Amino acid sequence: MGDWLKWALVTVVQFVIGKRFYVAAGRALRNGSTNMDVLVVVGTTACYVYSVYALLYGAISGFWSPTYFETSAMLITFVLLGEYLETLATGKTSDAIKKLVELTPVPTRFCRSEMRYTTGKCGGVIGQREIDALLIQPGDVLKVPGAKVPVDGVVTWGSNHVNKSMVTGESVLVLKEVNSVVIGGTINLHGSCHDPKSN
């Protein structure tokens, strides 16, 4: 490809596609700081200006020096490609965080007891009320009827089948009985159990 055609094409890349770098670099310099945009502008502008000078000098004197128009265009292209890939990765991370937030347990019923247990059942129950999962304290006894298990704990009463796929990746239901450990975020599908927060 001729240097004159390269000059025409790279001018579009340098000052149209790369305009955002010049704007961002100017803003950074006005604030008295430097960033990657300034680095890109300095590097690509140096390549572009030298190449234009070498091309015009060769046309006037007949002494042709190598030009580096493609270097300028490739730098801008690679930086923009990197920013695009970063945006994609950030979007995927946001989706993953959103899915994790969806695993946040819903409010659960709180069984207030005297912390006495006979044959695995909580004795002397005063009453129960529904509370937000964020208010659960160590030692609380929670009734989890067919919902997400709000916190890690141990079953003290009842039995149920839990979907642990969010932890193990396997969708096979696991039977949880008295003294079985349950993990917060897993889903209690069948049955009901009392689960004291262990940590």
Image (spheres, rainbow, N blue to C red):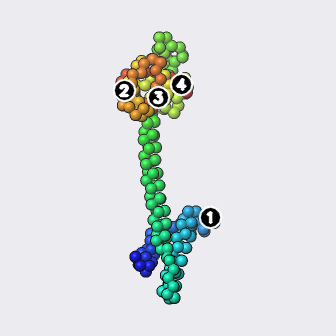
Q: Nearer the viewer, mark 1 or mark 2?
A: 2
Q: Which residue is mark 3?
A: 183
Give the secondary structure at mark 4: loop
Residue 134, how many percent across, how many down? 51, 33
Q: Amino acid at mark 2?
A: Leu
Q: Earlier in the sequence, mark 4 or mark 2?
A: 2
Q: CA distance from mark 1 to mark 2?
A: 57 Å
Q: Is residue 146 visible?
A: no
Question: Who's the residue at 49% across and 32% down the image?
Answer: 133
37 vs 133, nearest the viewer: 37
- Residue type indicated by callout 1: Ser
Q: Taking 198 as reference, is 171 left or right?
A: left
* Rendering coords of residue 140 (x, y %): 52, 23
Relative to 137, residue 42 above or below: below
Q: Residue at x 50, y 82 (%)?
A: 64
Indicate which disc residue 33 carries: 1
Instruction: Find out whether the residues at labels 1 and 2 contact each other: C-beta distance under 8 Å.
Output: no
Residue 165 occupies which quadrant of the picture?
top left
* Other residues around mark 2 within 10 Å, as few (<14) / some (14–19) / many (≥20): some
First in sequence: mark 4 vs mark 3? 3
